[in-house]
Image (cartoon, grey):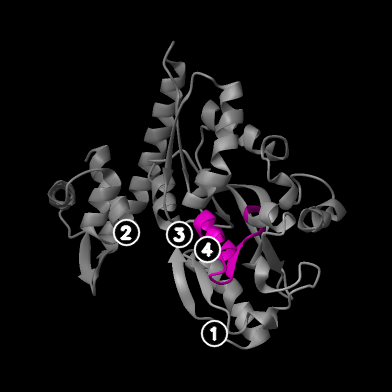
Amino acid sequence: MDVSQLRAIVTLGELGNISKVAEALHLTPPAVFSQIRNLENEVGAKLYERVGNRLELTGHGKRLAERAREILRAHDATLAELRELRAGAGALLRIGCGPHSGVYIMPPLIERFFDRNPAVEIRILTGGDDFLLHGVRTGLLDAILIHLPLDKVDLEEHPLFAYEMVFVVPAASGSPQRPVKPAELVGMPYVRWRRPVLVDAVLEKLSCEVGFEPRTVVEHDNPAAILEFVKRGLGFAILPYYTVAADHRARRVRVIRPATRSSHLVGLAYRRQGYRPRMLRDLLAVADQWREWWPLAAHVEPVSGNGPDEARRKGAIETGAR
């Protein structure tokens, strides 16, 4: 057995598809198939089987993948420690995030991080939650910026702040001084931010409150683009308040809050291991200072134990909303 074979069986257990495994590990599908076949020959047992459209690990495969994760964690932690010991070696930090965070959060975070670590090389990969979780769990990423909680036994979670999801409507939909009510969304076209779990939960609450299913006219995975569509009067959207705060205050858009506020926690996640590399420790320390380096900090809430008292936490978004 070698490390690449162990990564292949762990990744197959998570993704259930040879082609997806090959893409995640930057290999060809035949190379992945060969690695797993060699493992099967070595252990003398079938490690996966087809169940519908997915490849599922057998009992032997699950046991091997469980032990492989432990081996990979020890392997990656040892490599990280040895790299730090090498005199004069340039450090490398690999961070994963969503496309949204990659625009709104990552640039000022990395700018502040470079103030403390000017010689570090940083690689940022963006993708959906499944991609990010796979990357950090298999050692392809050192940390990910993601919604919490994850409730993964092999990952540590480091909460940072909570933000609010709101309905955003064009400024022309009424007098700027008159509050907009959720019922006024009935019949208005919907500009959908492609973030299914997060957005659909808020939309479901609205449907229950007002009693209608919106008609989607535009769908996009970039919230900045979604906001532009709304400003041009194409419909309403559901977005994080901090992404629309400036346009809201300038009265270029209007904001509606659901009866039950929709608050979501963001933080860093990384592998649970015995050794925490210095670069990761520095990243966590800089991230905790987000009130200092993030221009949009006034529009989110510190989380319990990571900032001001409860009264100030509750007031953070209210202040930013005015």
Instruction: Name the spot of residue 225 as percent of width and height, x first.
Output: 50, 57
Mark 2 residue element: helix
For the residue pair 10 and 131, the one nearer the viewer reads as 131
Where does label 2 land, which residue? 15
For the residue pair 100 and 147, the one nearer the viewer reads as 100
Residue at 31% x, 52% y: name it: 11
Instruction: Name the spot of residue 285 as percent of width and height, x first.
Output: 64, 33
Mark 4 residue element: helix
Instruction: Answer whether labels 3 and 1 touch (C-beta < 8 Å).
Output: no
Q: Label 4, label 3: how many angstroms apart (C-alpha)?
A: 13 Å
For the residue pair 307 and 87, the one nearer the viewer reads as 307
Mark 1 residue element: loop
Q: Is residue 166 left or right of residue 62?
A: right
Instruction: Name the spot of residue 320 as percent of width and height, x first.
Output: 77, 53
Asked if residue 254 lies in the magenta stretch, the reply is no
- Amino acid type for the residue under numbered disc 3: Asp
Query: What span is colored magenta in the figure?
Result: 223-243
For the residue pair 237 and 158, the one nearer the viewer reads as 237
Q: Label 1, label 4: how many angstroms apart (C-alpha)?
A: 20 Å
